[in-house]
Amino acid sequence: MDQKRAMTSVDIRALATELRDYEGAKLDKAYLYDDDLVRLKLRDFDRGRVELLIETGDPKRAHVADPDHVPDAPGRPPDFAMMLRNRLSGADLVDVRQHEFDRILVFEFERDDADTLLIAELFGDGNLVVTNRDREVIDCLDTVRLKSRTVAPGSVYGFPASRFDPLSCSREAFDAKMRASDSDIVRTLATQHNLGGLWAEELCSRAGVEKTRDIADATAEEYDELFDTLERLREDIRDGNFDPRLYWETESEDHERTRPVDATPMPLAEYEGVDCDAYDRFTGALDDYFYELDREEPEPGSTRPDFESEIAKYERIIDQQEGAIEGFEREAEEYREMAESLYGNYDLVDEILATVREARANDFPWGDVETRFDEAADAGNERASHVVGVKPESGEVTVDIDGNRIDLVPEEGVEKNADRLYQEAKRVEEKKEGALAAIEDTREDLADVKRRREEWEAEDTEPEPDEQDEDGETDWLAKQNIPVRYDEQWYERFRWFHTSDDFLVIGGRSADQNEEIVKKYMEKGDLFFHAQAHGGPVTVLKATGPSEPSKDIDIPERSRAEAARFAVTHSSVWKDGKFEGDVYEVTPDQVSKTPESGEYLEKGGFTIRGDRTYYGNTTVGCAVGVQCEPETRVLGGPERAIADQVETHVTLEPGQYAQNDIAKLIYRELKSRFADESFLRKVASPDLVQEFCPPGGSRLVE
């Protein structure tokens, strides 16, 4: 059995029902792990500590977790986690709901100053979106820009197009979907009724209906059984009548459990005979399931993944897809042959259809029509012998022409019946095109597994000497296994870089940080920089470290110019799309929080007294690169300053891409430059890269 990697729409409906029990819980803190796992720590009056996990990558899940199953808090929280804390700390959880019947959970929080929606998209690539009550996007894990919808900060969030909801549909709507299908029963329930494969099969099993029966052959009694079973299922979900199960795969000989395969809100007939555990709550079953699933994932450098099984699986899928493509080709050709047979025997077919129309116009029952044709055939009427049956439920007559059995609609005539067959051939060919696209995707997946196997096996061989350039230095871009070395520093929560002369420059990310830098970290001997334009960070060029005694040091002009460029780059000058601006420099004793008489200073603002040194028309400029020694990390700052500190870098200028979009472009570009494809993922992320990007729009300089 395949292991569940994402929750179904039925799972999410059941989970939303349970999570409403936590309404009123207050959010204490939010954490972000690996760019796709969010942990919300809440306090509930009755239950105490509540840990809510939402993962939008692989796997896709949401559930309340046992505190022992919660990962340790990460180091410095990324911007998205800080935004969640600022927005939601102390807020009350007031509602949890599924959007329609989609794999979307909406968490609604209320706080005196703001109401917030947290929208978890647990389908496709997955996403977590934070909006206000008017659904204006505050932030999101991933920016989405499609023809149908945009999800980006500042946009109005739009849910995906509505899909059929089997848990609220009427009997008429249910039957209409069945009648409109041209597939079998289980595929109709899975796709047209939006139940998905597992629950479509479950509905058939509970109703005692043959899954693979063609929809055209389904009876009214089978429709009744299916809809009655569906109604019982949705009543249980609506009323919270759950009996959750965690299902396990076992070894056939000793029944030893090997791995979990699914967690469901109630026992499934489809899993009859599969070893399972019963739970009081569905969220508990989900927690244990995904916890066990995580424990199965091998740690980097540990047990060798089963590449052969993956390769065999994809090769098996390709064989099936190739067989389906051949089947579509044959089916399309058969439809075209049938249409051509109608035209090749036009008079014969036209007379048969005319005879049926006349009989039906004279109120002959379908049974009598079939009897008359049988009698005529027995009497030697050659044309009547081509009629092999009638279908009263669909109003069709079946004929045998040139060895092809063809269902015809008498009212439509020869041309329309032939055209319908040509359209069927076209529809089948469209399925073939879809299958061809799918098989290319599978072949790419197969190639990816084979590539990962080669990389794993290469890592197991003896380490090769470092690739070196002509000067005897390590060629880090060509090196296959780059060791990761990193020691987090106190200044990394600010904007920062080291000048060409190795002086530290720090800048504030907010008004609070501006205040903190001036009050706590600016000392005698340092230099204070600020863009002349409104809306820029406090920038301090440090003469000494925070633990060193302050002293007057002659700071080179080159480092001062780099600090000035850093200050203007991260100001509103860049945000306004301009390429240069003025910057001034003063000493710490010229900076004061005491305003002039009659003036008011906003938070993060300062009064400057005395003469200033100006850097007029300072050009903006920013580069982001990857350092490989002495530490492995992302660096950013003026290009002249960081170029010699990094192995490779990209340069930015004001442009059209938002911060999070340009960060992803930079990440992909830098990642592609290293032979060690896993290296950048170990030391960076788009979120971390974004911390070095200026505010506003940017573009990569070719």
Image: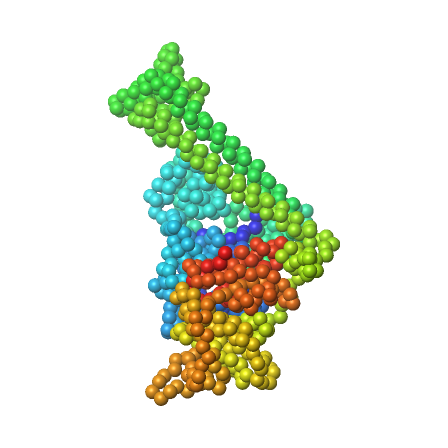
Provide residue 229's location: percent of width, then percent of height. Answer: 42, 46
Colour mapping used in the image:
rainbow
Provide residue 38's location: percent of width, then percent of height. Answer: 50, 63
**Residue 292 showing in the rendered view:** no
Left or right, 335 with reference to 39: left
The residue nearer to you, when weighing 625 against 95, is: 625
**Residue 5 showing in the rendered view:** yes
Of all residues shown, which one is farthest toward the bottom?
A: 597
Left or right, 318 with reference to 354: right
Residue depicted at x 55% and y 83%: 525
Q: Quadrant of residue 21?
A: bottom left
Provide residue 338's location: percent of width, then percent of height. Answer: 41, 24
Q: Quadrant of residue 463?
A: bottom right
Left or right, 623 with reference to 630: left
Relative to 88, residue 332 above or below: above
The residue nearer to you, when weighing 268 against 419, is: 419
